[in-house]
Image (tube, grey):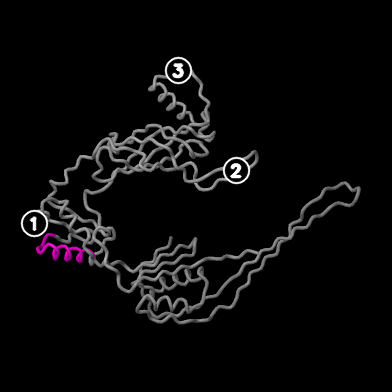
């Protein structure tokens, strides 16, 4: 018998949004990180490295590394199982200085089974411009574990990827003189005209003059010259902790795979009537073994025997969901239908199609 069980989590927000710091609502134009990538070699693996025949690039990088260290390996055949070729990725944070350390992520690109216990050999990390900005090296903390025997293998997590905390040291700084900036744009993470207007008002009130101007729903521009402060850094340090009450569109998020439903605080439903039924599918297998008579020329066969049944239970009838003024009313009205989570998702789809759900409906 096959039954489907799903879980529903209905998260209700407060009627009024709590004030949020400006630094948590916006990105400061020009203040961002830069992605780095490198190609390196992990050594010291316990027989879980690349197969050289299947990953010839591992042999190539290992030969180049040994030659740089003064070891002549010309014409030699490598067959180790304790090395693996990897990609190394990291993010160079804004205002990172030479000598500071950053975290790196290491991922196998060959047929290595696990990077657990391995050590990343010195690996240059390049930016999008091809320049080397950091060098990574260190012991890998793998994100999983694997065990195998002669006939079976068990894997938990992802042992072919791991991290090295503070595993790279910055060697080159990104050239950016923040002191020469005369205007600065604040980019809202969730563009909204009301939120942008509130940010503009709060900043102007803090400085006592009009230094902020809302350009559009996602941008607020600052005239740093009118702040009369020593540097742009002082301006950001003063305004990033100002509190603003953000606004957002009413939104309903549905994940059909897990049966999760998330509703924002501004979701509203018009008065609507809903009728819904339910189906239960049962499939039972009871195969029969048929054997030939004694001393007969025949063979044993398995005859399949299946029983399938569809049970359509009676629904709750036509139920009314009243017009809702708050999220609590929406939750109470939907819960009054007394249906399963999977059915609740279908009901929300139908209510949205009928035009009674006043929110952006997002299906994942």
For the C terminus, the quadrant is: bottom left
In percent of width and height, residue 51 lies at 53, 31
Task: Indicate the secondary structure of the residue bearing disc 2.
Answer: strand
In screen coordinates, is 45 left or right of 306? left
Q: Nearer the viewer, residue 167 or 201?
A: 167
Question: Whole-percent x and y of residue 208?
Answer: 10, 64
**Picture layout, residue 293 above or below residue 325:** above
Q: Quadrant of the N terminus?
A: bottom right
Mark 2 highlights which residue? 153
Mark nearer the N terminus (1 vs 2): 2
Decide which of 252, 177 is in the foreground and name it: 177
Is the stretch drawn in magenta largely helix, strand or loop? Answer: helix
Mark 1–mark 2 Cα distance, whole angstroms, equals 67 Å
Q: Earlier in the sequence, mark 3 or mark 1?
A: 3
Label 3 belongs to which residue? 74
Is 209 part of what is drawn in magenta? yes
Residues rendered magenta in the picture: 195-211
Q: CA distance from mark 3 to mark 1?
A: 67 Å
Q: Answer left or right for 136 relative to 278.
A: left
């Amino acid at each position: 018998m096959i039954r489907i069980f799903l879980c529903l989590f209905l998260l209700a927000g407060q009627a009024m949004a709590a004030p949020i710091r400006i630094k948590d609502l916006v990105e400061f134009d020009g203040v961002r990180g830069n992605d780095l990538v490198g190609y390196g070699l992990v050594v010291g693996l316990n027989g879980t490295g690349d197969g050289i025949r299947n990953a010839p690039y591992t042999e190539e990088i290992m030969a180049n590394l040994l030659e740089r260290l003064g070891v002549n390996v010309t014409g030699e055949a490598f067959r180790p199982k304790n090395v693996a070729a990897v990609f190394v990725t990291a993010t160079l944070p804004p205002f990172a200085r030479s000598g500071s350390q950053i975290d790196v992520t290491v991922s196998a690109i060959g047929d290595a089974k696990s990077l657990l216990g391995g050590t990343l050999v010195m690996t240059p990390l390049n930016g999008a411009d091809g320049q080397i900005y950091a060098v990574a090296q260190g012991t890998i903390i793998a994100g999983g574990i694997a065990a195998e025997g002669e006939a079976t293998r068990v894997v938990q997590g992802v042992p072919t990827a791991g991290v090295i905390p503070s595993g790279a040291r910055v060697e080159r700084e990104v050239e950016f003189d923040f002191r020469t900036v005369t205007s600065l744009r604040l980019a809202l993470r969730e563009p909204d005209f009301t939120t942008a207007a509130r940010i503009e008002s709060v900043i102007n009130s803090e400085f006592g003059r009009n230094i902020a101007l809302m350009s559009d729903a996602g941008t607020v521009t600052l005239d740093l010259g009118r702040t009369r402060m020593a540097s742009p850094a002082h301006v950001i340090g003063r305004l990033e902790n100002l509190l603003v009450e953000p606004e957002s569109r009413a939104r309903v998020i549905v994940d059909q795979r897990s049966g999760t439903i998330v509703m924002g605080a501004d979701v509203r439903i018009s008065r609507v009537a809903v009728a819904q039924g339910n189906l239960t599918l049962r499939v039972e297998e009871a195969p029969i073994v048929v054997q030939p008579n004694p001393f007969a020329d025949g063979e044993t066969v398995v005859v399949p025997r299946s029983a399938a049944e569809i049970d359509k239970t009676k629904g709750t009838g036509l139920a009314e969901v009243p017009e809702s003024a708050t999220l609590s009313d929406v939750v109470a009205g939907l819960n009054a239908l007394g249906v399963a989570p999977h059915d609740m998702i279908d009901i929300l789809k139908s209510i949205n199609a009928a035009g009674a759900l006043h929110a952006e409906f997002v299906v994942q």
